[in-house]
Every structure is written in structure tokens, then in C-alpha cells.
Image (cartoon, rainbow, N blue to C red):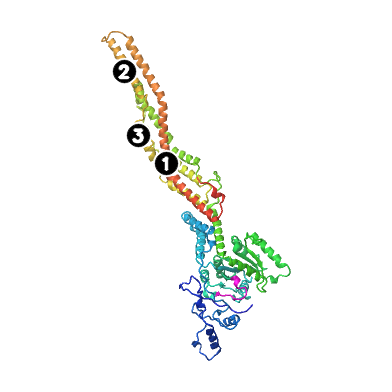
């Protein structure tokens, strides 16, 4: 390997996200003619020639001098075509002078299912903000933000980070892939203190800005045979993930969340390190398609020990849940290499080249991030949906609604109101069709019984009111628990809170209904036989009065003595009056019962309507919102789960 230092790329003028908005063209890259180059080199060879009289070679795109010195001359001498012709000469110090590529449309990999899932996740977060805490939705929001940020940047590039533990050989591998000494290597630990970026193609400045890599840490690879296969690659050398310096670990965690793919470099000594597997590989098992696991330093293993270690590494990855890309299946790529001797590097370059040319790593990374976010959100959207009495169904059943209406009717006293209405109808019928002498006698007995007996003090209906309020609260609590049964905890709590809010003022509203609806207004309706019974009772009373007057007249001598007729008239009235009253009472049972049932029905319906408007409708609104968010979650997760097929009542 040539021990030379790559050129520092402080700015990337070909990046379409250049803040200055500069547009560069190929002719600027070729602005220097062969004569200019020759003259420049000739002047540089004469020490007595002032340097200010001949400007230093500059990059035609940015107008800034390349302080490349030795590298520029080496590359120039190696790549100068026979016979001169320096118009297309590369003098960028080991980095080809790339012409800006035309801007491309949005990659098709971002459309279709991934676009649908991102839109669904955005809708899911919006619908859930008022029901879930910000911490629960933070990861989903971060995925949306990072996906939007990545989609705005170059689609031609694939950002791959090289990560690993101390002494695993990350920097050595980084330099081997770049073909030039870029990242410092050595026995001092930690060697890499900050992330270093190397781009094989112009236009990656925006991506490097997003990673927070400053211009002084941006490099270009050595252009030579095999460099074309890595066109579009942006390689990042990370500090040690197990570094004793906390800032180094922060760099690793931050950049691993932003890159398109990761190359994990392990060595034969620490490939089974618990920190690597528990902190990184296992949590990122869903990112297997954008993961490379490289067993480095196989030159240190004798015989077939490398194969044994590689097999054990595959076993550990399988235990971590990382799918292995073998036999054409999608998954992680596992290779054995030696960055020091170059063994396996060609195979890794080929795999990286194919991976980069597909230009689908960014979309696959975003899709894996969405999968991870959906898995984290699963407990708050799906779990618990199949438990409870109504297994397989979410919401309120008709039985639960009827039970709630019955409890409210019981609390408002609908049955008692119906009985009272029935008694009032019978009492009214008794007054109209009853025997007047019996009514007079009953009035007298009631009056005589009430004399001398102290009137009981009416107790305030405090206990009854408290009992009714408790019944209402119990009814609301029961229907809320039934509606929340099977829902994930946050949504079940939202349903209960909606029911409790609606129950505020419900007892008072039911009391008002009992007064306005439970008490009949006006006289009860009269059946068709009512006037006939009244006339019959009046005739019986008239017969008694006529017979009595006639009999008295005979006794005092005012009428001709004839006891038979007046006695018969009086007996007919005395016997007929109670018969008419008894017949009317029997006939009044049906209408009175119907009248009482109608009063009970009206009060029951009014109580049910009040409970529906105050409690059931808010609960139904929460269930509808849950159904909407669950449908969005199904789209986010990309599969139709059993919970998604469960109906909502």
C-alpha cells in the first residue's frame, strides 16, 4: 500500500446542496490547458522564480488552491497521456476531478410501499399526540425527520460506516478500501478520535454535513484500478464503540443512526463481545439487509481456525436474530478478511460495489427504521386486543349498551315512575267511576285515623340521592371498563377518561329528567268505556237518592204508601253502584298498566339518550380514533395482523 496522505476535501462544489447555490460545469474542471500545467511545473522547478508570478494549481470549480504537492505530481505523471494533452488531466491529488452529475429524480425505492408506510406513520403520530406521551412517539418522530432529511439529499450516494471495537482494525480496513493512508493506525488506543469521511464521488457534502463531519476530516480515495466499482460510496471511519472516552461513543451512536449501512469489524479475540452483541447487533437485528459483519485479522489464525471462528460468529449472529444473507436470502453479509495482508478485500470491495450500485441502501435503512419504530409502538397499539370477555372484538357490544341503559333507568327510578303512573291512573279511574258512598266512607276513615296520630317527619332523601349517584357512577365505570377491555393501556385509559368526563353532571341531568319526563303532564287518557261507567255510576246513585226520597215521603205521608217500588229502586242503586265500581276497576287494569309502562318507557328512553349523549358517544369517539390509529399502524407495520381484523363495536 502506498503510504501517502489523501487530499482533504473541505468543500464539495459538486454538491447540489451548496449553501451558496453555485452551479459548476465540466468546462471549469478543464479550464487549465496543457501549456498552463507545463508552465506551472517549469516555474516550480526554478527556485529563483517568484511563486507569486505564476498562480498555484487551483480547482477550477471552487477557485481554491489544492495543497496537494507531491500527490498531484505523482498522479499527473502516472496519468499523463502520451504526447501531452493536459486538458483532461487530473491534478486533484489522488482524487479524480469529477464533473457534476445531473440531478436525478426521486429514487423509485422511496415510492410505493415505503412512501405509504411513511405517510401512515406520520398520520399515526398526528392522531396519537393527544393520547400518548411525547416520549412514546419520540422514536417515530425521529424516524420521520431522518427519513425526510435523507430523501432531500443525494440518491446517488450510499453512506457506509465502519464500526468496531478497539484494535479490531477498522482504520486499516478503511485505508485498504480507500487505497491510501487516510485514517491513522497504530498501537495507541484510541487511535481514531473523530469520524473521518471518504467519498468516491462528488456531491456528498450534504450527506457529510448531516453526519457532522467537518471539512478538515473529509478525504478522497486514491483513484486507480478497481475504484470505479465503488462509485457513489461514502465511507465513514468511526471511533471505537467501546472507547474509554465518552465523546467517542457518542459519535458512534449518533452516526450509526444516520448512515445507510454499517460494516461491523470484529477480530478473533472480541468477536463475541457482549457489548457489541447486546448494545448494537441485537437491537439492530432488523437492519440485517444493510449490515456487513467482517471478521478481520484472519492472518493471525492458523489452519482452518478462521473457518471455525467464522462459523461461531454466524451462530452468534443467528442467536441475536440477525438474518444472514446466504443462499440468495436477504440478510447480513458475513466475510472473513485480513485488512493487513489484503486477503478477502477484493471480495468485500465487490460486495460493497454491488451494494452501492443498487442505490437502495438508504430506502432499506429507512424501511428497517420504520420496522423498528413499529415494533416499539406495538404495545400501545396492538397488544391486549385479544383479551377479555369479548375476545376478538374491540368496543361495546349491544348487551353492554343495554345493560348500561338498564342501570341508568334503575338509577333514575324508571320502574318506580311507571308504577306511580299506573297507580295515578287507577286512582283517577276510581274517582270517576267509584261508588260515591264508599268514597265518602274511605275519606272519613282516613280522616279519623289521621286524627291524634303525629305526622311523621319526612326525612330528606339524602340516602336515596347518594344511592342514585352511586348507581350512576357504577354504571359509567362498568360500561367504561367493558369498552376498554382488550385495548392497549393508553387507549383503554383514554376511553375511561372520556367516560368519566361525560359522567360529570349526569346524576343531576337524570334528576331533571325524572321531574320533567317521569311525572305525567295533564290528566291521563280515558278509554272509550269510561263515560259509560261514569253514567252508570251516576244512574245507580240517582236510583238510591230517588228511592230514598220516595220512601221518606211515604213515611211522613206525603206519598201514597207503596214500599215495594222505592225499596227496589234503593236496592238496585245500592247493589249496582259497587258492581259498576268493581267492573270499572277490573276494566281499568289494562289501560293503567299500559299507561304506567308508557311512562316507564319514556323515562327509560330519556335516561338512555342522556347517557348515550354524555357517555357512550364520547366513548365511541375514542374507539373510532383507536380504530383509525390501528389501521394506520397496520399500514406502518406492513402486515395485516389479527388485531387489525378485529371489529370495533
Q: Which residue is mark 3?
A: 521
Instruction: Return the residue found at the far bottom.
Output: 48
Q: Which comes sooner in the sequence, label 1 or label 3?
A: 3
Front one among 47 and 76: 76
Relative to 278, does residue 300 appear above or below in the rendering?
A: below
Mark 3 → mark 2, Cα distance in angstroms? 33 Å
Stretch in magenta: 218-230
Q: Which residue is mark 2?
A: 542
Instruction: Return the residue found at the far left.
Output: 558
The residue carrying pointer 2 sits among few (fewer than 14), some (14 to 19) or many (20 or more) residues within 10 Å by Cα, namely some
User: Helix or strand or loop: what does disc 1 sit on?
Assistant: helix
Residue 346 visible in rendering = yes
Q: State which mark lies toward you, 1 or 3.
A: 1
> In the visual, does 508 lie left or right of 317?
left
Q: Which mark is residue 223?
A: none
Q: Residue 77, located in which quarter of the rendered image?
A: bottom right
User: Helix or strand or loop: what does disc 2 sit on?
Assistant: helix
Q: Which comes sooner in the sequence, label 3 or label 2?
A: 3
Q: Main secondary structure of the magenta part?
A: loop
Instruction: Return the residue found at the far top.
Output: 561
Q: Which residue is mark 1?
A: 609
Q: State which mark lies toward you, 2 or 1.
A: 1
Amino acid at each position: 500500500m502506498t503510504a501517502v496522505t489523501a487530499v482533504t476535501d473541505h468543500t464539495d462544489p459538486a454538491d447540489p446542496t451548496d449553501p451558496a447555490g453555485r452551479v459548476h460545469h465540466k468546462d471549469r474542471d478543464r479550464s487549465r490547458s496543457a501549456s498552463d500545467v507545463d508552465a506551472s511545473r517549469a516555474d516550480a522547478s526554478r527556485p529563483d522564480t517568484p511563486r507569486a508570478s505564476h498562480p498555484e494549481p487551483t480547482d477550477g470549480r471552487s477557485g481554491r488552491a489544492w495543497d496537494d504537492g507531491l500527490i498531484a505530481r505523482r498522479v499527473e505523471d502516472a496519468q499523463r497521456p502520451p504526447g501531452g494533452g493536459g486538458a483532461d488531466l487530473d491534478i486533484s491529488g489522488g482524487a479524480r476531478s469529477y464533473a457534476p452529475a445531473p440531478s436525478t429524480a426521486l429514487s423509485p425505492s422511496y415510492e410505493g410501499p415505503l412512501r405509504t408506510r411513511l405517510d401512515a406513520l406520520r398520520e399515526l403520530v398526528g392522531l396519537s399526540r393527544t393520547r400518548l406521551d411525547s416520549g412514546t412517539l419520540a422514536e417515530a418522530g425521529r424516524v420521520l425527520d431522518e427519513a425526510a432529511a435523507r430523501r432531500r439529499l443525494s440518491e446517488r450516494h450510499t453512506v457506509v460506516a465502519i464500526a468496531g471495537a478497539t484494535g479490531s482494525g477498522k482504520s486499516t480496513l478503511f485505508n485498504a478500501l480507500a487505497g491510501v493512508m487516510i485514517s491513522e493506525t497504530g498501537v495507541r488506543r484510541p487511535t481514531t478520535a473523530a469520524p473521518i469521511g471518504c467519498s468516491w464521488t462528488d456531491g456528498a457534502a450534504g450527506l457529510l454535513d448531516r453526519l457532522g463531519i467537518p471539512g478538515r476530516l473529509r478525504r478522497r480515495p486514491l483513484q486507480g484500478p478497481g475504484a470505479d466499482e465503488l462509485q457513489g460510496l461514502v465511507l465513514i471511519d468511526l471511533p471505537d464503540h467501546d472507547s474509554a472516552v465518552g465523546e467517542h461513543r457518542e459519535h458512534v451512536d449518533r452516526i450509526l443512526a444516520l448512515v445507510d449501512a454499517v460494516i461491523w469489524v470484529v477480530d478473533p479475540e472480541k468477536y463475541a463481545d457482549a457489548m457489541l452483541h447486546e448494545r448494537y447487533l441485537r437491537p439492530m437485528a432488523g437492519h440485517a439487509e444493510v449490515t456487513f459483519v467482517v471478521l478481520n485479522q484472519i492472518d493471525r489464525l492458523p489452519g482452518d481456525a478462521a473457518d471455525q471462528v467464522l462459523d461461531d460468529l454466524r451462530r452468534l449472529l443467528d442467536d441475536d436474530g440477525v438474518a444472514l444473507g446466504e443462499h440468495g436470502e436477504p440478510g447480513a453479509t458475513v466475510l472473513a478478511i485480513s485488512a493487513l495482508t489484503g486477503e478477502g478485500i477484493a471480495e468485500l470491495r465487490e460486495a460493497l460495489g454491488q451494494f452501492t450500485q443498487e442505490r437502495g441502501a438508504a430506502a432499506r435503512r429507512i424501511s428497517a427504521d420504520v420496522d423498528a419504530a413499529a415494533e416499539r409502538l406495538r404495545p400501545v397499539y396492538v397488544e391486549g386486543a385479544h383479551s377479555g370477555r369479548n375476545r376478538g372484538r374491540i368496543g361495546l357490544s349491544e348487551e353492554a349498551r343495554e345493560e348500561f341503559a338498564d342501570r341508568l333507568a334503575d338509577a333514575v327510578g324508571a320502574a318506580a315512575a311507571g308504577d306511580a303512573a299506573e297507580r295515578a291512573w287507577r286512582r283517577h279511574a276510581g274517582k270517576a267511576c267509584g261508588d260515591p258512598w264508599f268514597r265518602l266512607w274511605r275519606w272519613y276513615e282516613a280522616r279519623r285515623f289521621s286524627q291524634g296520630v303525629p305526622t311523621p317527619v319526612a326525612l330528606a332523601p339524602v340516602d336515596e340521592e347518594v344511592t342514585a349517584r352511586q348507581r350512576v357512577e357504577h354504571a359509567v365505570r362498568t360500561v367504561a371498563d367493558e369498552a376498554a377491555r382488550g385495548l392497549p393501556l393508553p387507549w383503554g385509559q383514554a376511553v375511561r377518561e372520556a367516560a368519566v368526563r361525560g359522567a360529570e353532571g349526569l346524576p343531576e341531568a337524570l334528576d331533571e329528567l325524572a321531574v320533567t319526563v317521569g311525572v305525567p303532564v295533564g290528566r291521563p287518557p280515558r278509554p272509550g268505556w269510561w263515560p259509560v261507567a261514569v253514567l252508570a255510576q251516576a244512574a245507580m246513585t240517582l236510583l238510591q237518592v230517588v228511592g230514598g226520597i220516595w220512601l221518606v215521603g211515604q213515611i211522613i205521608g206525603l206519598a201514597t204508601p207503596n214500599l215495594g217500588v222505592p225499596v227496589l229502586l234503593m236496592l238496585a242503586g245500592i247493589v249496582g253502584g259497587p258492581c259498576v265500581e268493581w267492573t270499572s276497576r277490573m276494566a281499568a287494569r289494562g289501560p293503567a298498566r299500559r299507561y304506567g309502562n308508557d311512562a316507564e318507557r319514556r323515562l327509560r328512553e330519556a335516561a338512555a339518550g342522556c347517557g348515550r349523549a354524555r357517555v357512550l358517544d364520547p366513548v365511541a369517539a375514542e374507539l373510532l380514533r383507536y380504530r383509525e390509529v390501528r389501521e394506520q399502524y397496520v399500514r406502518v407495520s406492513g402486515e395485516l395482523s389479527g388485531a387489525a381484523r378485529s371489529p370495533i363495536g
